[in-house]
């Protein structure tokens, strides 16, 4: 497939999401024209102001419900050269009762954007789906290094189907992201010879970094950064959670750079690509923020009533039995990763600026 070069128009779904905002900013800075979709123009008007310096190179359109209509994206895909599908209820919250509240929107929304691209986007040459390592992850008691050939077929979807509302939140989430991705690939492979575009899926773990959204309290942050804040800065979680293994992370800025690069690399088409900086436990981040000197968040200095937590030092010895091989992202997308120190420093400086 031809590369999508600077000046081309890119559709970014879920434009008001924390990752999407960074992605839009990066694409605009690289010279792309960006059309973003949101459910409500009124509630997302801050994006127009945020990117007003780019003039008519950024536009915002409303797609009110991506799940209840087969043609929800029909108008928004017209005239674009590439699509980055970054909207799914899967990445918003785990706090759902009925697993279908995650599964149906994830599957229908993902297939919906592909269907619209197939019938109404004659100029589309590449579709990128931002997904989760949840569709690759599988439980293991011994060390396993997973790559893009792996699928979360360890019975998670069967457990969710059997247990229904009683299934764990993580199982519901992983079932949704797995089924959505499988549906995307099934749609693509069934019609590949008839399509003008190719498909690739980028898998991300927890995405951290300074938020761009104009939120006024930590409770309004997106899920990943909110959990980071309440584990690392203002503890509102059990100490046991600090030592939970098999978590991985990436700086959101590195994730969106790799995603933008995926538009211009022909070899990325048809691939699943893991973008991950490595494994971590929450205690690792606590250790990092306490080691930074000078502290980027002086309002939480030692001796104050808001002093940063010390956590549980034994976190250094946690063994990760599930890890990800992210070498494909380095090989194909030349992905590079910030250190935990840099990501933590920038997040804390942002929290300090916001008065948190």
Image (cartoon, helix red, strand yellow):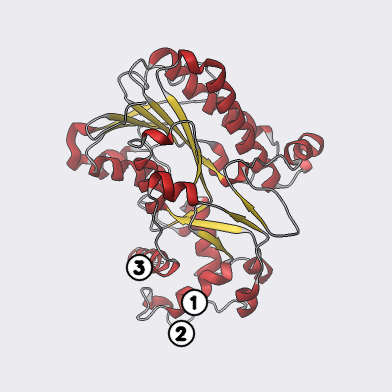
**Which of the two residues, 324 or 184, is positioned nearer the viewer here?**
324
**Which of the two residues, 114 or 20, is positioned nearer the viewer here?**
114
* Number of residues whose C-alpha sits closer than 10 Å to that of mark 1, classed few (under 14), some (14–19) or many (20 or more): many
Mark 2 or mark 3, earlier in chain: 2
Mark 1 or mark 2, earlier in chain: 2
Quadrant of res 64: top left
Q: Give coordinates of residue 351: x percent, y percent.
A: 39, 65
Identify the secondary structure beneath mark 2.
Answer: loop
Q: Quadrant of the N terminus?
A: top left
Q: At 81% from the left edge and 36% from the top edge, which residue is drawn?
A: 162
Identify the secondary structure beneath mark 3.
Answer: helix
Circles 2 and 3: CB distance less than 8 Å? no
Q: Give coordinates of residue 309: x percent, y percent.
A: 54, 77
Q: Give coordinates of residue 9: x percent, y percent.
A: 28, 28
- In the picture of the structure, the residue carrying the numbered disc 2 is 302
Circles 1 and 2: CB distance less than 8 Å? yes
For residue 290, above or below residue 204: below
Give the Cα separation between the discs numbered 1 and 2: 7 Å
- Count every numbered label the image shows and give the total: 3
Give the Cα separation between the discs numbered 2 and 3: 17 Å
- In the picture of the structure, the residue carrying the numbered disc 1 is 308
**Which of the two residues, 162 or 333, is positioned nearer the viewer here?**
333
Q: At 42% from the left edge and 81% from the top edge, which residue is drawn?
A: 301
**Which of the two residues, 150 or 119, is positioned nearer the viewer here?**
150
* Number of residues whose C-alpha sits closer than 10 Å to that of mark 3, classed few (under 14), some (14–19) or many (20 or more): some
- In the picture of the structure, the residue carrying the numbered disc 3 is 349
Q: Quadrant of the C terminus?
A: bottom left
Label drawn at residue 80? none
Q: At 43% from the left edge and 48% from the top edge, which residue is drawn?
A: 331
Q: Is residue 169 left or right of residue 131?
A: right
Residue 141 visible in this rendered orientation of the protein: yes
């Amino acid at each position: 497939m031809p590369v999508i070069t600077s000046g081309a128009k890119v559709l970014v779904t879920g434009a008001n999401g924390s990752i999407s905002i960074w992605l839009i900013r990066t694409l605009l800075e690289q010279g792309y024209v960006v059309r973003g979709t949101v459910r409500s123009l009124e509630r997302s008007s801050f994006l127009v102001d945020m990117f007003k310096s780019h003039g008519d190179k950024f536009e915002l359109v409303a797609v009110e419900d991506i799940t209840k209509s087969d043609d929800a994206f029909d108008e928004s895909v017209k005239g674009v050269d590439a699509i980055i599908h970054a909207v799914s209820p899967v990445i918003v919250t785990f706090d759902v009762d009925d697993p279908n509240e995650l599964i149906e929107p994830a599957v229908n929304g993902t297939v919906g954007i592909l269907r619209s691209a197939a019938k109404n986007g004659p100029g589309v040459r590449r579709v990128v789906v931002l997904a989760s390592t949840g569709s690759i992850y599988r439980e293991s008691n011994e060390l396993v290094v997973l790559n893009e050939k792996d699928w979360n077929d360890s019975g998670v979807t069967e457990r969710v189907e059997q247990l229904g509302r009683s299934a764990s939140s993580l199982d519901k989430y992983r079932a949704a992201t797995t089924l959505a991705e499988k549906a995307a690939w099934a749609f693509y492979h069934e019609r590949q010879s008839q399509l003008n575009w190719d498909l690739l899926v980028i898998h991300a773990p927890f995405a951290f970094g300074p938020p761009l959204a104009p939120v006024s309290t930590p409770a309004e942050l997106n899920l990943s950064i909110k959990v980071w804040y309440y584990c690392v800065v203002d503890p509102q979680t059990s100490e046991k959670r600090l030592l939970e293994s098999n978590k991985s992370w990436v700086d959101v800025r590195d994730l969106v750079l790799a995603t933008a690069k995926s538009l211009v690399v022909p070899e990325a088409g048809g691939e699943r690509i893991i973008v991950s900086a490595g494994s971590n436990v929450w205690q690792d981040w606590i250790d990092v923020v306490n080691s930074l000197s000078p502290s980027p968040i002086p309002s939480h200095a030692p001796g104050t009533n808001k002093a940063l937590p010390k956590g549980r030092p034994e976190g250094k010895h946690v063994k990760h039995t599930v890890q990800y091989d992210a070498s494909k992202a380095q090989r194909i997308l030349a992905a590079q990763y910030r250190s935990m120190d840099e990501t933590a420093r920038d997040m804390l400086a942002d929290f300090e600026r916001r008065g948190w």
